[in-house]
Image (tube, rainbow, N blue to C red):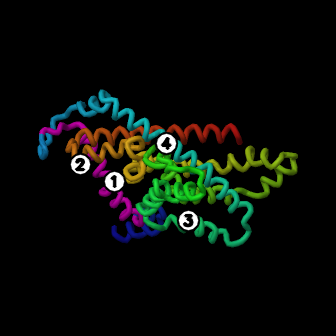
Amino acid sequence: MNSTIQKIYFRSDQAKAYTLLSPALILVIFAMAAPMIVMIFTSFNTQISMIEIDRTFTTGRYEDFFSKPIFSMLLFRSVKISFFVTLLTLVTTYPLAYYIAFYVKKNKMLWIVLMTLPFWTSYLLRVFSWRVILGNKGVINSALMGTGMIDEPLGFLLYNQAAVIITLSHAWAAFAILPLYVSLDKIDKSLLEASYDLGNTKFETFWRVTFPLSLPGVIGAILIIFIPTVGDYVTPQLVGGTDGRMLSNMIQSLFGRANNFPLGAASAVLMLTTVCLIAALVTYITKKVSMRMS
């Protein structure tokens, strides 16, 4: 019996794959799935005191979320900021990935490494660097005041939504370059030559051939950037100020000083649900656009 099972196992590539993936799968279950399940169950409870939670099932925390305008406002702001972060990051990283894929002939990986090298530093350090750059005594204000272009520091550079968008776009740029480059580099160059032979211009070739074929990388970059930035806490906390606070900052407060675990859990569940729905919608729309363009 054991020998038969061993023969089946060694002949089955799928069984070997599941065996190799099992440690990672167990880690994902315990590190992500289990806390998520606990969070969902907690969202249907009620905080009675500092240390006591009523486990009676109730949807009151979700009613609290939608009855208080600040929660909906922060959720909308989080999605809006993440949208502009994703858009700005794609606009700045797509040309770089395109240049490396089609114009760099040697040492492409060296270019990728050099572009991503600054992002190997601490995320917190990069956020703090933008706080220094955009501050009243930062690089920009010091340079403008040194040249006599302004007499007083520009206060609107920091502690607002624009500062959060700029900082997050820079922080996640490296994660967008990689899927875009891989997608562009895999494009068969003979297809571009065939498009030119048919009389298409460079722009027409890009729009009809290159861009549709690179959409898998675009989708990957969108999801990689949008999903984590919606729930980012550090950046709005350090450079956002009152105007740049996001729902993640409210959730941290609910789990911290406010000591309302069920409402914090309900807010997190609703934010996660919103992100999943938007990600599914973006994937669906992009695939439809790709089918029409192909």
Q: Nearer the viewer, mark 4 or mark 3?
A: 3
Q: Which comes before the other along the chain, label 4 or label 2? A: 2
Residue 212 visible to an observer of this rendering: yes
What label does residue 256 carry, if any? 2
Q: Amino acid at mark 3?
A: Thr
Q: Amino acid at mark 4?
A: Ala
Q: Which region of the structure is painted magenta?
A: 19-48
**In the image, is residue 247 above or below residue 193?**
above
Q: Nearer the viewer, mark 3 or mark 1?
A: 3
Quarter the C terminus occupies: top right
Main secondary structure found in the magenta portion: helix
**In the image, is residue 125 above or below residue 149?**
below
- CA separation, marks 1 and 2? 21 Å
Q: Which comes before the other along the chain, label 4 or label 1? A: 1
Q: Quadrant of residue 285?
A: top right
State the residue position of label 1: 32
